[in-house]
Amino acid sequence: MKYYLIAGERSGDLHASNLMKALKQQDPTAEFRYFGGDYMQAVGGEQVVHYKELAFMGFWEVIVNLRTVARYIKQCKKDIDAWKPDALILVDYGGFNLKIAEHAKKVGHKVIYYISPKVWAWNQKRAYKIKARVDKMLCILPFEVDFYKKFNWEVEYVGSPVMDAVKGHTANPNFYQDNNLDPTKEIIAILPGSRKQEVSRILPVLAKVAKQFTNYQVIVAGVGNLPNELYESITGLNHVSLVFDQTYDVLAHSKVAIVCSGTATLETALFTIPQVVVYKTSVFSYQIGKAVIKVPYIGLANLIVGEEVVKELVQGACTVEAISSQVEYLLTNGTDYKELTKAIGNKVASEEAAKAVVKELSNV
């Protein structure tokens, strides 16, 4: 079978790559073509566009890059039609992927969505649009099954690929020496995000927070495909280290983490690392988001459990003083994640999703 996958960011790239590996187990004839990243490329197949060309975050940022997005949407539609896949597998990245799904459904391609767009967060009636454009929805958050039932759509919860990735990680035994770190000093991790916009806005604030904790080793988890100048705000701080593309190892060795909102908040929780969730965007994007977002939290751990398991400091509340105070609290008190792990369960998401994809295609 021929599978065309689209992932528009780093976490989607990781989870899509694991799905590709599982599909190879279920379907030895599997061929892959995709919009994705380095993880997918390592599995094989042919990459059409790297996700870094499409990683725009925030309402305003997307608006000013609409021409670029439109150009890639057009390219993607043409490429899918030319390749004629047996299944189009969309991975999160709702704005782009739903445009592709609309086209693919019209011309008769089988459309499978793995990792639902966060339609429950804002403009929930988009669920009707998704239902009309998608043949099979494979969800990774347990509450999404009940959400979609409100729209008379039976979707499948396949488990959390984040849990799979965390469980499958083996910590580097040479982490300290490989990165010139002091094994005798406890680590505070800073995860400032994987997109240019979020790193540029949040890291200067977090650099000031780092200055409050000179008795600890502070590690910034950098992303190698972003420009080095984005991390300039932490240069010159002797107790701060920048470690690229080793986020899981950073978390595995940390006592507390400061995490920019996104998938990393769930990854941190599943490593059972106490954390404070932070987020800061443009004033324009924030005001739009505040007006339309329908959920009480931005952190995935909080959304899954249904209460504030971890503290969230957003926009105006995202200050040096507030973050520092919360880090001090966490260093002593920690965080209880028992209800989160219970809610997520023990399914291996990539394996369950691959089985569901093959089953869906066998029903054609």
Image: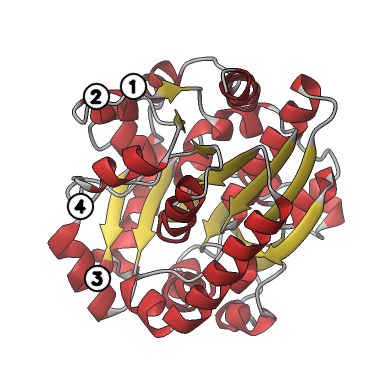
Where residue 132 appears, as percent x and y from the top left, is 33, 40
Q: What residue lies at 70% left-to-right and 58% top-to-bottom? A: 82
Labels 3 and 4: the sequence-earlier one: 4
**In the rendered image of this protein, does residue 102 appear above or below residue 361?**
below
Q: What residue would you read off at disc 1? A: 154
**In the rendered image of this protein, does residue 26 appear above or below residue 327?**
above
Along the line of sight, the residue nearer the viewer: 220 or 340: 340
**In the rendered image of this protein, does residue 130 appear above or below residue 60?**
above
Q: What residue would you read off at disc 4? A: 123
Are the two marked residues, 4 and 1, in contact with CB atoms closer than 8 angstroms?
A: no
| Marker disc for residue 286 | 3
| Marker disc for residue 61 | none
Are the two marked residues, 2 and 3, in contact with CB atoms closer than 8 angstroms?
A: no
Are the two marked residues, 3 and 1, in contact with CB atoms closer than 8 angstroms?
A: no
| Marker disc for residue 149 | 2
Labels 2 and 1: the sequence-earlier one: 2
Q: What residue lies at 33% left-to-right and 37% top-to-bottom? A: 131
Tell me how far mark 4 sits from mark 2, CA to CA.
16 Å
